[in-house]
Amino acid sequence: MARLLSSLTRRYKAIGCGFTHPAQPSTTIVPLSNHYPFASPKFSSLLMDSNSPDFVGSSSCSSTKIQLYSYWQSSCSWRVRFALNLKELPYEYKAVDLSKGEQFSSEFERLNPVHFVPVLVEGDLVVSDSFAILLYLDEKYPQNALLPVDVKKRALNLQVAGIIGSSIQPLHMQSVLNYLDKKAYPEDTLSWAQHYVIKGFTALEKLLKGSAGNYATGDEVFMADVFLAPQISVATTRFNIDMSSFPTLNRIYEAHKVLPAFQASVPERQPDAKVVVR
Ligand SMILES: N[C@@H](CCC(=O)N[C@@H](CS)C(=O)NCC(=O)O)C(=O)O
């Protein structure tokens, strides 16, 4: 535990940029502490909501240039939010409301012709696709690396990212389920999604069982964790997946949930969150 705390302290040191706290979303949200009991406000200072009336377009930290086009419920956007927080990089939040089809606007199409979030913009650079964004960030901002130096661990991280990014999430994304619902598989899109999540999680459980430490590939948070945590959250909350069949994944996810960088990246804490108070 002492080792974990000292590693957290090392990784989450203050960055010294004086950003204003983002405005609360207009909708009342469920207090974060209801979901994540150790929630810390520290990382909210890394996020600026450009759609908020409080946003003035700049900050006291001259290095701030990153904009993230994101949707609160998008697990792919969530990966990038988590990574930006791990790297302690401030960014401007540009909300794209997928529920209103804003990804199809001509303005957004200029950024990503395939109409998906996330998109990261930095100066004149536009990068879409969470995997490409994470690799870009890791090369440009090597602090708190997303990929380990050890080549075997590196390969394992890329493999986990590949399984989630290619063999799980694309098969259950909302637009795919909507399409199936309308055209091909109207009976039960939930069981379709569950099938692919369980298939992927079964593989990931086998893959990580022997090599996981506190986190997916050891005692440090790497890319595998950045992909895993949002995927497990979506699996349990949206598709009712029972994690008792995946004890290693479940244990790792419990460790993610207490990380401040993760807590600040959860959907409910994003400026565009719409969560009904229960
Ligand atoms: N491979 C892409 C996938 C991106 C993706 O599927 N984004 C979803 C949200 S998680 C999206 O924008 N969906 C909008 C739509 O399907 O119209 C990535 O990792 O960024």
Image: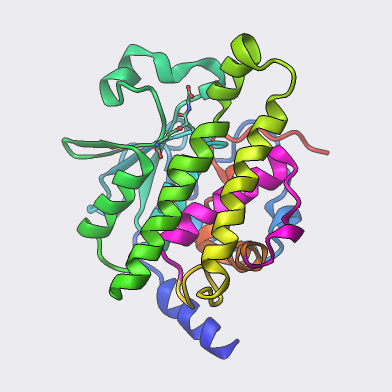
User: For the point 54% across and 16% down, which residue is it?
Assistant: 100
Q: In the figure, is residue 275 to the left or right of 204?
A: right
Quick one: which residue is furthest to the left in this view?
Answer: 124
Measured from the top left, where is residue 189 in percent x and y? Answer: 68, 25
Q: Is residue 178 left or right of residue 107?
A: right
Q: Is residue 249 above or below residue 185?
A: below
Question: Looking at the picture, how far across and down is residue 220, in whole percent?
Answer: 45, 74
Q: Which residues are magenta?
A: 221-248
Image point (70%, 47%), residue name = 236
Q: Quadrant of the N terminus?
A: bottom right
Which residue sits at x=72%, y=56%?
Answer: 243
Ligand 1 is found in the corner quadrant, namely: top left
Q: Nearer the viewer, residue 64 or 197?
A: 197
Within the image, what quadrant is residue 11 found in? Answer: bottom left
Position of residue 67 relative to residue 141, above or below, is above
Q: How is the image coloured?
A: rainbow
Image quarter in which the C terminus is found: top right
Residue 144: x and y in percent read 34, 69
Extreme residue in the bottom direction: 2
Q: Which residue is farthest top? A: 183
| Principal secondary structure, stretch drawn in magenta | helix
237 and 206: which one is in front? 206
Residue situated in front as seen by the camera: 143 or 198: 198
Residue 272's spot in the image, x, y percent?
Answer: 55, 33
Lateral position of residue 4 relative to residue 243, left or right: left
Is 234 magenta? The answer is yes
**In magenta segment, residue 171:** no
Res 57 quadrant in image: top left
